[in-house]
Image (cartoon, rainbow, N blue to C red):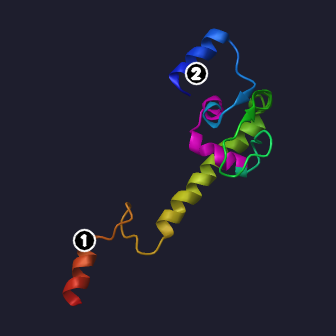
Amino acid sequence: MKEDQHRFLSLSGQLPARLTVEQVAWLLNCQPHDVPALVAARLLKPLGNPPVNGIKFFSTADVQEQLKDRAWLTKVTNTIIQHWQRQNGRKKDRPGTGSPDGHRPMLEFAERVVTG
């Protein structure tokens, strides 16, 4: 959450009725890029029917109620972990990735050039 939002919330003492992705992430103590995985897993439901690539808002009351549920928080945590394990696993499984950064090792390239 941005500094000015945090300052506003501390002065007003309450959250707005609708939360942005960044605000939901802040309340859940996760990153904004984790929220789409939670929406896909149906652990968070955006308000209305936003387009897939549109801005999404979430009900503050719904999120605050879910925050009290330990089982729901466990599902959120496991969903985020599994999402990033899948994402990182796909990077490792790509053909031609000889190193962690996805580039082929220089030695392998040099051997192909020499043996041609």
Magenta highlight: main SS = helix
The residue most toward the bottom is 116
Between 67 and 39, the one lying in front of the other is: 39
Q: Which residue is mark 2?
A: 5
Distance between mark 1 and mark 2 Cα atoms: 48 Å
Tell whether 57 sits left or right of 22: right
Q: Position of residue 70 (x, y in %)?
A: 75, 34
Magenta residue check for 29? yes
Q: How far from the left and from the top, in percent, is residue 56?
A: 69, 41
Disc 1 secondary structure class: helix
Of marks 1 and 2, the one in the foreground = 2
Camera-side residue of 95 and 8: 8
**Disc 2 residue type?**
Gln
Compared with 92, 24 (above or below) is above
Residue shown at 74% from the left, 35% from the top: 58
Nearer to me, 99 or 37: 37
Circle 1 is placed at which residue position? 106
Q: Look at the image and give the residue range highlighted in magenta.
A: 24-39
Residue type pointed to by label 1:
Met
